[in-house]
Amino acid sequence: MARVTELLVNGSTRRIDADPDRTLLSVLRDDLDLTGTKFGCGEGQCAACTVLVDGVATRSCLTRVGTVAGKRITTIEGLAAAGALHPVQQAFLDHDAMQCGYCTPGMILGAVSLLGRNPNPSDAEIVSGMNGHICRCGTYPRVVAAIREAARKGGRA
């Protein structure tokens, strides 16, 4: 079984020597030292591990690394560009849409994916689009406000 895989992560090609059945989450964290992607439930239910794969929110704890070779992977570390925060990141800061921050990277990437599909969502569409992102601190109203503001400022990927 082939073990060397090339991944396009945050705009850079990275070669890894990994079993293709390993999770993308474990490769990102353990092999590439991209620890912004969080392990939550390990079952794809909490969305703490969300990354973008070709612009689509993807649960990295369920994704086998062998299935994403050649695809564009974006983690929270790769979202900001040219020293400026992405509009969704800035909106989360401006609206205090985080408390402990554990779920925040996954929420931000989920919001970027949502805005890529629907650049002007209603509050109900934001809630529906973010369904499955679990925040134990309960910052949901501020998350909705942040996404609403990011939409106004063009917060797509």
Image (cartoon, rainbow, N blue to C red):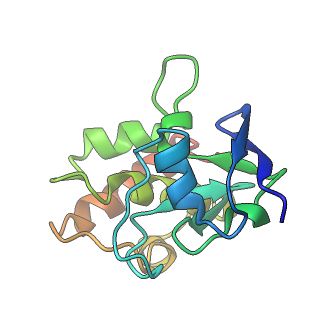
| Residue found at x 83% / y 66% | 1
- Give the answer, above or below, for where 22 lies relative to 70: below
- Give the answer, above or below, for where 11 lies relative to 41: above
Q: Where is residue 49 drawn, in percent x and y?
A: 45, 63
Q: Where is residue 29 drawn, in percent x and y?
A: 47, 48
Toward the viewer: 151 or 70? 70
Q: Is residue 128 visible?
A: yes
Toward the viewer: 59 or 57? 59
| Residue found at x 43% / y 70% | 47
| Residue found at x 56% / y 35% | 78
Q: Is residue 92 left or right of residue 153?
A: left
| Residue found at x 49% / y 17% | 83
The quarter of the displayed image where residue 63 is located: bottom right
Q: Is residue 115 visible?
A: no
- Give the answer, above or below, for where 46 lies relative to 65: below
Kindly give the residue lying farthest to the top in the view shown: 83
Q: Is residue 143 left or right of residue 65?
A: left
Q: Is residue 65 left or right of residue 49?
A: right
Q: Where is residue 128 drawn, in percent x and y?
A: 47, 80
